[in-house]
Amino acid sequence: MRNLKADLNRYSYGSDKSFVKLMFISFTKLGFWAVVNYRCSTYFRKKTKTVKVFYYPILLITSITRLIVEILTGISISYHSNIGPGILIAHFSNVIIGDGVEIGANATLHQGVTIGVSGRDEKRGVPSIGDDFFAGANAVIAGKIKVGNKVAVSANSFVYCDIEDNSVVSSSVLKVINKNGTDHV
């Protein structure tokens, strides 16, 4: 639950607000709803895992809350992912964090970001992402890859290989493929 406080602080965008104002502002952000659901659900699932009489009702309740949050926000965060403190989902909708994904502290995700599984055979897997990660709108980070600390992925990029620390990556290259205009579309 300590991570939730760090998440809450990220939604202040560096301004000095009182805790009550910060709570009010954060709960108007749909990305924060998804983060709160993820943090609380994973906390209760871990705490009740050894006590089966509580564990199964918690599984049911957290599954229902995840479905509700996904419908309301368009954000899907797997309870089987491992996300460090201070995640900020800056713009909601169509954000997906898959099973087994690892994300370090202070990640910033914009709308349309997908982080998940890709590859075949021994190359199949999910990303492991370092601290201070930034993903622009509609970025896709997929496969059994390692993304270093302080990496920024530009909008509309597809990251499928390892990325070193302190890198800015972009895979969107504008290319004219013909000169037929809209005649043949």
Image (spheres, rainbow, N blue to C red):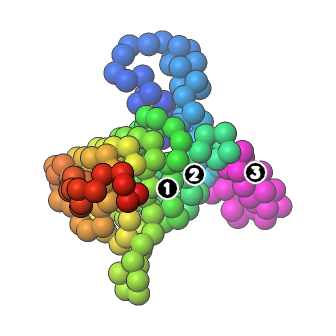
Q: Secondary structure at mark 3?
A: helix
Q: Which mark is residue 64?
A: 3
Mark 1 surroundings within 10 Å by alpha-carbon count, few (fewer than 14), some (14 through 19), many (20 or more): many
Q: Which residue is mark 1?
A: 97
Q: Is residue 48 above or below residue 143?
A: above
Q: Which mark is residue 76?
A: 2
Q: Is residue 14 visible?
A: yes
Report the residue at 42% width, 22% height from top: 12
Q: Is residue 107 visible?
A: no
Q: Is residue 147 left or right of residue 103?
A: left
State which tag comes first along the sequence, 1 or 3: 3
The magenta span reads 43-68
User: Quarter holding the N terminus?
Assistant: top right
Looking at numbered disc 3 in the image, what kind of residue is underneath it?
Answer: Ile
Q: Secondary structure at mark 1?
A: strand
Mark 3 surroundings within 10 Å by alpha-carbon count, few (fewer than 14), some (14 through 19), many (20 or more): few
The one nearer the camera, 100 or 68, is 68
Q: Contact (CB < 8 A) between labels 1 and 2?
A: yes
Give the residue furthest to the front. Answer: 183
Q: Is residue 50 left or right of residue 141?
A: right
Looking at numbered disc 2 in the image, what kind of residue is underneath it?
Answer: Ser
Q: Is residue 141 left or right of residue 99?
A: left
